[in-house]
Image (cartoon, rainbow, N blue to C red):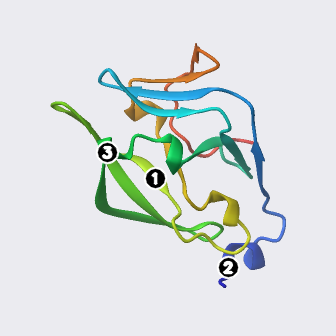
Amino acid sequence: MTTAPGFEKHPDYEIATEVGTQHYQVRFNGALIADCKRPMLLSESRHRAVFYIPKADVAMEHLKATEHQTYCPFKGNASYWTIEVGERQAENAVWAYDDPYDELPQIRDHVAFYADRVDEILIDGDRQPSVAPGWTDH
């Protein structure tokens, strides 16, 4: 069991998750990469909200693990995958916290997608803007 060090330094920092009922799909180079009817929305202080999708709802055969990693003091170490379909690739377009800190066990076995690196993300059939996750002013 490992506690997230970020919450000790920043006790007002908030991360919340909620499982939704939206139909979430990711397409790349004509292939359906993710097809999920219970995506988890993760909302985090000063960041854009991000959908996390169970790996069971992802066509993992199109994902190739990379050596790229990042670290979050609230969630842990993130691993990355490149999407490969035909001749096209989207480098490090998918990430996951395979061993998240104790405060966020619900994101284990889930992945998230960079919207600006895939062809389209659809929520209930509506195409979403190609905005990368990142900082916000609120």
**Residue at horizontal 35 percent and vertical 52 percent from the top:** 81
Q: Position of residue 91 (x, y in %)?
A: 29, 44
Q: Which residue is disc 3 drawn over?
A: 61
Q: CA distance from mark 3 to mark 1?
A: 15 Å
Q: Nearer the viewer, mark 2 or mark 3?
A: 3
Residue at numbered disc 2: 5
**Residue at 55% in and 71% down:** 99
Along the horizontal axis of the image, is 82 left or right of 16? Answer: left
Which quarter of the rendering shows the N terminus?
bottom right
Residue under label 1: 95
The amino acid type found where label 3 is placed reads: Glu
Q: Earlier in the sequence, mark 3 or mark 1?
A: 3
Amino acid type, residue under disc 1 in the picture = Trp
Q: Is residue 63 visible?
A: yes
Q: Quadrant of the C terminus?
A: top right
**Secondary element type, mark 3:** helix
The amino acid type of the residue labelled 2 equals Pro
Q: Residue furthest left?
A: 87
- Name the one closer to the observer, 134 or 105: 105
